[in-house]
Amino acid sequence: MDHFKERSTRDYFQKKLYSLEGLMERENRCIYEEPAFCHAACPLGLDAKKLIAFIEKGSFSEARAMLEHITPFPRILVYGCEAPCKKVCRMNEVGEGIDIPALERAAINHGSPKTGKGMLKFKKKQKAAVFGSDLFSLSLAAELARKSYPVSFYVSQADAVSLIKDCAPFLSEDDLAKEAKKLEAMDIKIIYSARLTKELFESEKKNFDIIAAARSFLSICFPGDLPDSRTLLSPVSQLLSSQNGDPNVLEAIFDARRAGVSADRIAQGLDPGSSRGEEGARESRLYTDMSEAVPSKRIPEPREGYAREAAIEEAARCIQCKCEECIKHCVFLQETGKYPRILTREIYNNVDIIMGDHLMNKTINSCSLCGQCTVTCPNGYDMAEICRDARENMVSTTKMALAYHEFALLDMLFSNDEAFLSKPQSGYEECKYVFFPGCQAGAIAPDAVFKAYSDLAGRLEGGVGLINGCCGAIAKWAGRTAMYEECEELLISELKKLGNPQIIAACPTCKKTLEEMIGAEVKGIWDILNENGLPAGALEYDRPLIMHDSCSARGDRDMQAAIRKLTDSLGCTLKEVPYNGDMTECCGYGGLVSYVNKDLASKMAQSCTKDEDVPYISYCMACRDRFAREGRESMHVLELVYAAPAGNPPDISEKRKNRLNLKRKLLEEVWNEEVIEVSPEYKIVIPEDVAEILDQRMILEEDVYDVIEAYHAGGSAVYDEKSGLLTSSLRKGNVTFWLNFTEDEAGEAGVYTIKGAYSHRMKVRTRYDV
Amino acid sequence: MTDNKVYYSVEAEENLICSKCGIPLEKTEAVFEYLDNSFPVELPACPKCGFVYVPEDLALGKVLSVEKVLEDK
Ligand code: SF4
Ligand code: SF4
Ligand code: SF4
Ligand SMILES: [Zn+2]
């Protein structure tokens, strides 16, 4: 199977990422969009958090508009409401809860009413009648008028002020007058001084489609006819009325709202109980961490209400409850600016697109698959699973461009081919153990690997074989299942040749991957060292260090403890940081982020190493390398154990050379095999600044050698007479490599000095070639 | 290629010589191909051996950005 065949934009394959239920099941774990506690507690659904945010910005009119929107008589609400929101405010836990009703009053007092007429609305055909006045029937009459029903409102009072006063006796004279004026301006036909009798009702009801009444009217005219608890429709009289005989302000207004919904259903000829959705207060599923909330006291509300400044100050105490647990320490999520629920939906949709731009591809490939979110999220959201599934899906539908992961995949093949080594200990055919250092250890700290193997082979009984290669994690991270399976086949067969020995890994990712692969326990070299003691010559380290746990050690407390035991015996003093252990962050190597999104990977490494003055110690070579690349003092625990400091981080070409040299050294010095090396008859000089460019542009020295070799063998090049530079190119696989160089015929062998290098993936040809 | 539209054109400067054939490069009709898409362009090439020259700024500029767009199509 050709793993490196480029995709075609003309292939139209599609496979759903999840079933709809599977998608919802995942999305629902993220409660980011849940209403704040105060919001959920309000049966009217007032988003107090939003209202408070408006006030904090000084936008009192916006806040007022929210109140006008939820009830026709906001003054009655804000002066009469029992405010369940205030009781559930999370600030109560650390001090005093936010005085939400006081802020609502400030919104009414300091905000201006919305001006301008609303949209022109046509009156509905169905007519409504409301008999008798209480807060419920008053609110319902206004509610129905808002819904454009022609409303007739029969009341015993003689004028609007006394009507409002009877319904809301707690209002001040001033507010009474204001709400009365409001009532008069509404499109309601009010029949004042009506004699509210059953006879009136019987004679009038035939003229109306919707009939409602104050609760006292219902009880007097139809004793025992009780409104349904959900629809508020009374079965005998067909009157809509409040549920309780003596509702409080909030109940009355909420009942008017519910009765309004029933009225709509009745007008449409539907069952009033149908499609009502969720109504009323509920408990929020939101999670909000209060550990950093600063306790504060309520700003007292004077009798005349808050002044603007005081309201703003009170509003500023609100912590705007939200859940951001996963985002707090995930640089990837911070970078996307999206929380997992929405991110999941966008990834799902992205996978669904057959033709067109897949804007989320880079995002899908930028998650480090580190699993931190699953630990930080109160509901265990697993973003890694979703990104990994999406990658596998994209590969299987040929939507994954090779450009994202090709370099890493070729590097894995290099580890498992040219640089691969699998041998039993000399003198053994089968071994009790096999040391599996992992591809990164050989690439970054080859001396430590060499010494570790010699140490294990020397001290353990029963033979210690060696398999030096990649565990396949790279293919897994890239979503390349078929490549992973090939790797699995290779390793399983090599293990079998060695007599299926106990694997000793030196990398947490290898340990985890191999355990999944063979379905048996893999030991860490740290376990062996703890059992058998340190080798002679181990370096003592007396400066304090910060231990960075590998993201592959998440959930593996034994491993985390074993490492600490090991550093303890080395005499290290560890400084623990909060985001460590199971909560640890990824260095940016995981999930191949450093190949796809270099800038993000840098930020990840920086985020892991915020303390710039203390050296970091880790037990994953990739962490060690990535921290050092960010200029941090960083070491792998094996560098201390084997007194083999690896020095400056190697570039991409040195990582390959290190692996080849390690293999040669092992073969020559451990297995006494001769290794023949061929070198070209000419010389290639790569100055340091060019080596840096090569590293940045992911061009290997091997590629440089191949371009020069092709040119040397008679290939074409452009000679620029002005600069004196030659430029030649070579297509290797899916990439065309270009070099600028000079050719120097000093002596008999040529010397090529490289001056620049670049590459592209597009193929180029003249239009005459086919 | 029947398409006469040219997406990009690079002049062949006089100082560019094919080192193999010893003759100056000429502006030549060429094609970029990627993921089953092709784009007619004009690039300096050797009229004799057909070596097409893609200058660095073109490779890292226009070519790279078109690659990225196609990769996510
Ligand atoms: S931690 Fe993240 S994923 Fe979990 S509920 Fe909160 S926002 Fe959603
Ligand atoms: S702190 Fe703010 S958002 Fe949270 S419950 Fe209290 S008022 Fe609502
Ligand atoms: S797996 Fe890691 S990188 Fe990916 S979203 Fe979760 S915490 Fe962030
Ligand atoms: Zn030529």
Image (cartoon, coloured by chain):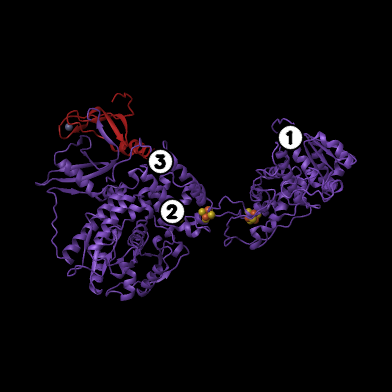
Chain colours: A purple, B red
Q: Are marks 1 and 2 in contact (CB under 8 Å)?
A: no
Nearer the observer, A143 or A732? A143
Distance between the alpha carbons at the discs numbered 3 and 2: 21 Å
Residue type, label 1: Ser
Distance between the alpha carbons at the discs numbered 1 and 2: 51 Å
Whole-percent x and y of residue A37?
64, 55
A346 in relation to A89, above or below:
above
Q: Chain of mark 1?
A: A
Whole-percent x and y of residue A268?
70, 36
For residue B45, say whether it is visible. yes
Residue type, label 3: Gln
Residue type, label 2: Ala
Disc on the earlier residue, 1 or 2? 1
Q: Which residue is mark 3?
A: A14
A460 in relation to A732, above or below:
below
Q: Seen in the image, is A292 located left or right of residue A447?
A: right
Dot 1 surroundings within 10 Å: few (below 14), some, or many (20 or more)?
A: some
Q: Which mark is residue A148?
A: 1
Q: Chain of mark 3?
A: A
Going by the picture, which residue comes out furthest to the left?
A748
Whole-percent x and y of residue A762?
30, 37
Going by the picture, which residue comes out furthest to the front?
A236
Kindly report which numbered mark, 3 or 2, lies closer to the viewer in this rendering. Answer: 3
Whole-percent x and y of residue B53?
24, 34
Q: Seen in the image, is A734 located left or right of residue A674?
A: right
Nearer the observer, B8 or A341? A341
Disc on the earlier residue, 3 or 1? 3
Please, what secondary structure does the residue beneath circle 2 have?
A: helix
For residue A110, say whether it is visible. no
In the image, the residue with mark 2 has its CB under 8 Å from the nearest atom of ligand 3: yes
